[in-house]
Structure formats: C-alpha cells, structure tokens
Image (cartoon, rainbow, N blue to C red):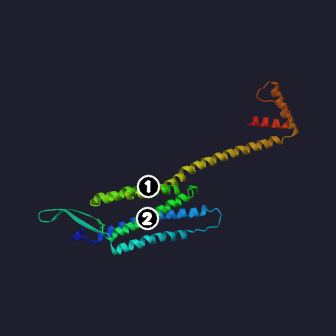
Amino acid sequence: DENDVNGLAYSGEYAPANAACMASVWLYNLGFVITFVPLFVKMWRVNKLFNNPKLRKIIISNRLLFKIIMVFILVDLSILIPWQVLSPVVYVREVQESDSFGIPTSSVGYCRYDAGSPSIIYITVLQTLHLVYLIGGCVLCYNGRNIETQYQEGKYVTIAIITYLQVLAVSIPVIILSYGEPVVSLIIRIIVITLNYSTVLFCIFYPKMYRLNYLQQTHASDMESIRTERSRRRLATKTSKASGGMSESGKSFRRSFFRSLSANSSPVIKEETSDSSEKEEYQMAVQ
C-alpha cells in the first residue's frame, strides 16, 4: 500500500489492497476445487466401469465429467459471490508506534477477518464443504483399491489427501495464534499452500513419470529377451525337423558315424538302436 497517499488503508478503504485480500480467498478455494475434484470425478468413472459385476454397458463421456466438475465449481461460487458482495475481506493498516507529534513511525498491514463478521461464517461453510469433498474422495479411493494402479491413482490420491489434512491440522491453530503477526502469518500460509499442492502434484505425476521411463525400459528389455528366446526355439525346431526328414542313406551314415565313435571308446556319445533316441543324440550334438 505504498501508493496509499491518503492513508485509506488505516480505515480499510484502500480498494487495491482490499481486492488483493479477496483475490487470495478466491484463488485458494477455487484452486482447491480445480485440483481435487477432477481427480475424484476420474476415480468415480473408473469405479463405475471396473466395479461392474453384471458387465452392463456403461458410457461416461468426458462431457459428463466436465459438467460434474462445473457443478462443484458453481457450488463454491455460490458461497464466494455473496461473501464478495456482502462482507468482503478488507485490508487494514494498524499503527504500532508513533512519535511525540502523533506521526506513525511503525505500522503493520494485514487482511482482517473480524470475529463477529459474516466472513467467519463463509470460511466455516467453505472449509466444511471441502472437508466433505476430501472424505468423499477417500471413499472413492477405498472402493477402487482392487483396481490396477495403471488405470487409477487411488493410492497416490489418498496419500495426497492425508498429507493435505495433516498440514491443515497443524497449520490452522498456528495461523490463528499468529493472527496479530502479519509477517509470521503470511510465511505460514505460503508454506502451507506450497506443501499441500506440491504434494498433490508429486503424488499424481511422479508415478506416471516413473512408469513411463523406468518401467517402459524394463518392459522393452523383457520383450527383447522374449524375442531372443523365441528365435532360439524357432531355430531349434527347424533343426529338429531337418533331422527328422533325412533319407535312409543319411540315417545309415549317421549310424555308422556313431558306431565309429563308440569303437573309439568315446564316453560322451552312445549308440542307440531306436530312431527316436538317435534324433535326441543328434540334437544334442548339434547344440
């Protein structure tokens, strides 16, 4: 409020600062809905498709999902708009020290939420509503616990929700206790928002990046091993068929070859009378 040459902030009438205070409220609450609700809607669709024991035909289009998300956003807007019109958060600057002439020498500015104002009611309603969203998301994650992770992120969304609730449980009392310290309160809010939403981004995108890079490379290596094994077996099959299709003269030559080796007391190869045994020995010799 350095441009407030008329000192309007001292009475809570400096419009740019007041708009900034309400903008933080709008961004935080709508950011919550835009972050979590699409994840919950996606899990709802996955649960509908996979938890379908009767194998009924179910069509859930992206258009329907967008409509559901818009409904949740409109619910938040129905609370934020009256709050903005009827009891907006205002920015005030309070004098902490002044000189002997009454001129302020030290002051602090902050967004004021009066205890008796409707702002507290709007905050309570919004946070209760968001808590219901999180509980519903946990229920969806639990219902889809048996679905493969590659189709849904229920496990990671649950981790994000639990982390979000833990951070809020610790930060809310601290923010209330530091209400009279604007700098401390601002730092705590920055840390809370950073931890909450960076955790969500990490839990959602890191497993996908891991699966896309590491597991894909592992899969490619496994497929190469499978192709090599198939080629080896195909070659062995062709060799076996070639030996099985030999003429009588070839078989006679092979018998004489094995007899000559036996005559030299070779301990490795042994003559057999049946054609099937000779084929096996020949395959062993070829390998």
Give amino acid for label 1: Thr
Residue 263 visible, this angle: yes
Residue 30: percent from the left, percent from the top?
A: 42, 67
Local crowd size for mark 1, using a 10 Å CA cut-off: few (<14), some (14–19), many (≥20): some
Q: Are marks 1 and 2 in contact (CB under 8 Å)?
A: no
Q: Quadrant of the N terminus?
A: bottom left
Q: Name the residue under label 1.
A: 163
Residue 78: percent from the left, percent from the top?
A: 42, 73
The answer to whether 258 is drawn above or below residue 131 in the figure is above
- In three-dimensional space, the C-alpha distance between marks 1 and 2, rounded to whole angstroms, equals 15 Å
The answer to whether 246 is drawn above or below residue 93 in the figure is above
Looking at this view, name the residue that lies furthest to the right. 248
Per the image, label 1 sits on a secondary structure element best described as: helix
Residue in the picture at 83% in, 32% down: 272
Per the image, label 2 sits on a secondary structure element best described as: helix
Q: Quadrant of residue 84?
A: bottom left
Q: Earlier in the sequence, mark 1 or mark 2?
A: 2
Residue 264: percent from the left, percent from the top?
A: 80, 24
Give amino acid for label 2: His
- Is residue 209 toward the left or the right of residue 176 in the image? right
Q: Name the residue under label 2.
A: 130
